[in-house]
Amino acid sequence: MSAIAHEPESPASTDSVLQFTHAVTETWEFGLEIEAKGNVRGIVATVPVPVEWPEQSIKVVDSKKTRDVSRVTFKELGGTVKQMVIQIPRLTKGSTSRTTLTMEIAKRNIVAPANPADFKFADIKSRKIRVFLTPSPNINSSHERIVKLAETIPIDEKTNA
């Protein structure tokens, strides 16, 4: 197996109002293994991979691909999702192709603010914010079950959150 060329991750942005707990780091492996049951041509596969967030940093520690993988690229979708795109020109019956990316993911919890008044509600008319608040292809936030569940979440009258 050979290494995959990947872009280095940029450090997570920091916001002066946000404070975080200490980081808990885990090692995760993302990838794909395909076993050909017959001769196959023109395989293109995608695998979601984590992205940087203020509370999450990513470090690629290893990457591998078998010889039959011709190309591995990365694609950002809407600035919030990242995909590893794997291209395999051909696989012969009985052969197996494998592509992996090993990452260290450091996650931190966001500390509740001492003064919630430091925060303000986002302008939901803003295009940058709306993407996080509207239904997406695989998460329908307006689904009846989700709306009913959201109505059960208690609201703190002091903070309105």
Image (cartoon, grey):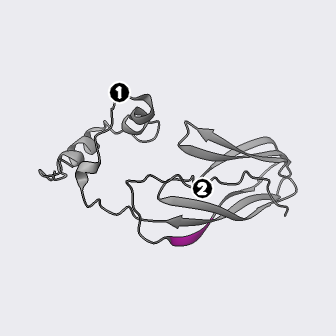
Between the residue at mark 2 and the residue at mark 1, the CA separation in whole angstroms equals 28 Å
Q: Residue at x 86, y 51 (%)?
A: 92
Q: Residue at x 23, y 46 (%)?
A: 150
Instruction: Decide whether the magenta segment is chiefly helix, strand or loop.
Output: strand
**Image-quadrant location for residue 22:** bottom left
Q: Please name whichever residue, 117 or 104, is drawn nearer the observer in this view of the structure.
A: 117
Q: Nearer the viewer, mark 2 or mark 1?
A: 2
- 54 up-or-down from 108: above or below: above
The magenta segment: 24-28
**Image-quadrant location for residue 144:** top left
- Give the image location of residue 90, x and y in percent: 85, 46
- Give the image location of residue 147, x and y in percent: 24, 41
Q: Work out which quarter of the rendered image holds the N terminus and state it.
A: bottom right
Q: Please name whichever residue, 1 or 51, is drawn nearer the observer in this view of the structure.
A: 51
Instruction: Let me know if residue 25 is in the magenta part.
Output: yes
- Give the image location of residue 161, x and y in percent: 21, 49
Of the image marks 2 and 1, the number of the one nearer the N terminus: 2
Q: Residue at x 41, y 64 (%)?
A: 20
**Image-quadrant location for residue 121:** top left
160 sits left or right of 7 in the view: left
- Give the image location of residue 64, x and y in percent: 78, 62
49 sits left or right of 137 in the view: right
110 sits left or right of 56 in the view: left
Q: Secondary structure at mark 1?
A: loop
In the rendering, which numbered label is found on residue 11? 2
- 135 up-or-down from 6: above or below: above
Q: Residue at x 31, y 36 (%)?
A: 142
Q: Secondary structure at mark 2?
A: loop
Mark 1 crowd level (few <14, some 14–19, many ≥20, 10 Å Cα)? few
Q: Which residue has dot 1 on it? A: 125
Amino acid type, mark 1: Lys
